[in-house]
Amino acid sequence: MVTGKGLTMRMKRLLVAAIVLASPTALVLPASAEWFADLYAGTAFTLGNDVFVLGTKLDPPGDFTRQHRAVNFDTSASFGGRFGRWDDTWSWLGVALDVSHFHPDVSRQTVITTETDLDGSVKQRSPFARLDLSVTAISFDLMFRWPFLKSDQFPKGRLQPYLSGGVAAFVATAEDTTNFGPPNKQSDTDASIGVKASAGVAWQLHQNFFVFGEYRFTHFSPESRPRQRRARLLRGGPVSKWTSIPTTCSWECRTASDDADKPVLCPRHGTSCMYLQ
């Protein structure tokens, strides 16, 4: 447990593989354009990865970096929708907007942790508490398809293998329990840019309906800055600064001096806080 300020959590190279099964596709066919709208659901598998925590300790004072190695993420449900259009001239080429959502939570586990500060590095096995993650991905995709089993009823091919890929925006919300406190139960929302690629096959059941199966891969690196509790000083005259205080201090802090670089001391517990600039 670290009492600190300016904490930053980073998850490098978060990789997600998702399998989408038995998803209906509704096709709208005006005079020449070939529009489509998909709804899908499946399972997301997030590969284990390192979680980094960067911040500033108050006792002893100084910056630190903590690396939790090979943290395992839970398998979760994934669902979403896609809307796009196949080109009139090159019917094998299409564009789409895809929106999906999944929850790669982290369950309580024991991991190898390396903490590095001005005094050196310490490596040990330590518990990693539950961390809830919620991710929404919005991607702009290019799509390529190959028509098979063409007929008068299915001129574009009844069987259509396809590939797609593009740039994606990921909005990730992290809700911590006790990993980054005190205070506990901190949360933050981060937006990052990543990539998405997928491969699948579609089978046309009717002129306006397909079913398809798809395997997709996403890659992004979320970064979270957990919000810490802040309280106004109630003693020592006019209040002109904010302070971040440990939960044990409650409202019993006083100003040690007018120097913002010096700590704020709790008269009962003897613990210290540091001004947030």
Image (cartoon, grey):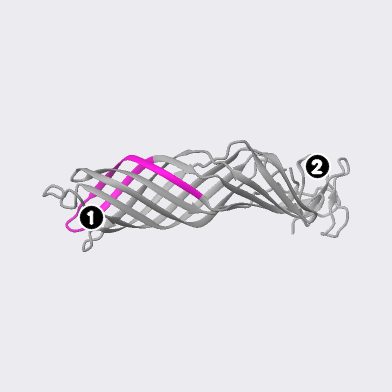
Circle 2: residue type = Cys
Q: Mark 1 or mark 2, which has the lower sequence index?
A: 1
Would residue 104 appear left or right of 180 to someone viewing this image? left
> Residue 64 has which mark?
none
Secondary structure mostly taken by the magenta-highlighted segment of the chain: strand
Would residue 26 appear left or right of 100 to someone viewing this image? left
Task: Indicate the secondary structure of the residue bearing disc 2.
Answer: helix
Crowd tier of the residue under label 2, counting other residues whose Cα lies within 10 Å: few below 14, some 14–19, many 20 or above: some
Circle 1: residue type = Glu
Residue stretch in magenta: 15-41
- The residue nearer to you, when weighing 112 against 277, is 112
Mark nearer the viewer, 1 or 2:
1
- Residue at mark 2: 249
Residue 191, horizontal then vertical, whole percent: 53, 55
Residue 27, horizontal then vertical, whole percent: 24, 48
Residue 254, horizontal then vertical, whole percent: 85, 49
Residue 238, magenta (yes or no):
no
- Residue at mark 1: 34
